[in-house]
């Protein structure tokens, strides 16, 4: 039981550790995105520039954001300039978008799909580890008798930790989708599987899943299917279903 609780706590912490940098990166990205009007140091005339917000967000995760221009209305003729307008561009207010573009580019974490995905992945786990599916072989891999596994399933702690892990994983995927601004089934699957690979690889490298091949097949199968389920739901639920869901 202690091994199970420790593993679930590790998964929860891993999701949380990955989620916080994503939120910080999204904050930096939002600060630098958009088109800005500045006076060109060479011509002293107004020009429209865009800062490379993605580069600023990535570099800002490990220190001060590195700011460079992604485009300028004087480019490509003057693409080799020294970008001396960057300080003014950082202080400038981004130009407002049209209503249609603003609605399209509005990045919101889809709370309702994330909650549905977390609930669905938890229910999948309950069925997967039930006595009708993999409870007996799972119990043998961790050194528990069937009765001990049955008693463990009747306690609250494993279920609460599993719910927490499912919620954090779902919100990690939802937050990343909101950050990149593209929410589709395919993109949701890409992010959820990538996150699953990262967490699973970390656990394998650190030796925290050293319970034998059968355990890896059982838990790997469940978590992989749960990741697919989260990706499909978070990425695929139509926006009109949750557009009134408060942030």
Image: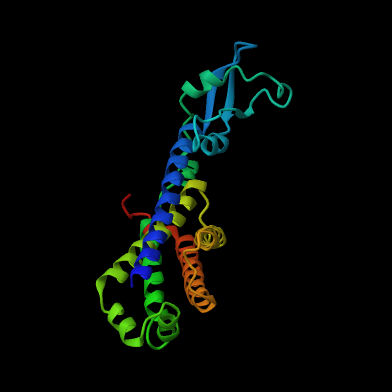
- Would you identify the image quadrant in which residue 139 lies? bottom left
Q: Is residue 233 above or below residue 101?
A: below
Farthest residue, direction right: 77
The x and y percentages for residue 111 are 36, 56
Q: Is residue 27 above or below residue 242?
A: above
Q: Is residue 77 above or below residue 135?
A: above
Name the residue rendered at 31%, 82% in the picture. Answer: 148
Q: Is residue 241 visible?
A: no
Which quarter of the rendering shows the N terminus? bottom left
How many labels sit on residues? Answer: 0
45, 72: nearer the viewer: 72
52, 99: nearer the viewer: 52
- Would you identify the image quadrant in which residue 14 lies? bottom left
Q: Is residue 14 visible?
A: yes
130, 174: nearer the viewer: 130
- Judge from the rendering whether residue 86 lies leftward or rightward of residue 226; answer left or right: right
13, 226: nearer the viewer: 13
The x and y percentages for residue 35 are 54, 30
- Judge from the rendering whether residue 144 lies leftward or rightward of residue 203; answer left or right: left
Colour mode of the rendering: rainbow
The x and y percentages for residue 43 are 64, 11
The x and y percentages for residue 66 are 55, 29
Q: Is residue 32 above or below residue 182?
A: above
Name the residue rendered at 46%, 65% in the picture. Answer: 230
């Amino acid at each position: 039981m202690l091994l199970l609780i420790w593993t679930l706590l590790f998964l929860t912490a891993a999701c949380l550790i990955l989620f916080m940098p994503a939120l910080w990166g999204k904050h930096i990205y939002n600060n630098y995105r958009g088109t800005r009007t500045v006076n060109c140091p060479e011509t002293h005339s107004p020009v429209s520039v865009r800062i490379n917000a993605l580069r600023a967000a990535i570099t800002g995760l490990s220190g001060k954001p590195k700011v460079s221009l992604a485009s300028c209305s004087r480019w490509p003729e003057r693409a080799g300039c020294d970008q001396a307008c960057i300080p003014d561009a950082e202080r400038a207010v981004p130009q407002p978008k049209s209503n249609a573009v603003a609605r399209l580019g509005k990045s919101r974490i889809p709370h309702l799909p994330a909650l549905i995905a977390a609930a669905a992945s938890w229910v999948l786990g309950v069925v997967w580890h039930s006595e009708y599916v993999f409870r007996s072989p799972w119990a043998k891999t961790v050194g528990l008798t069937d009765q001990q596994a049955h008693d463990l399933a009747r306690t609250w702690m494993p279920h609460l930790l599993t719910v927490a892990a499912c919620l954090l994983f779902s919100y990690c995927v939802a937050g990343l989708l909101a950050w990149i601004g593209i929410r589709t089934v395919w993109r949701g699957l890409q992010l959820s599987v990538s996150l699953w690979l990262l967490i699973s690889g970390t656990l394998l490298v650190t030796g925290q899943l050293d319970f034998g091949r059968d355990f890896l097949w059982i838990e790997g199968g469940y978590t992989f299917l749960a990741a697919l389920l989260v990706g499909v739901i978070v990425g695929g639920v139509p926006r009109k279903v949750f557009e009134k869901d408060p942030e």
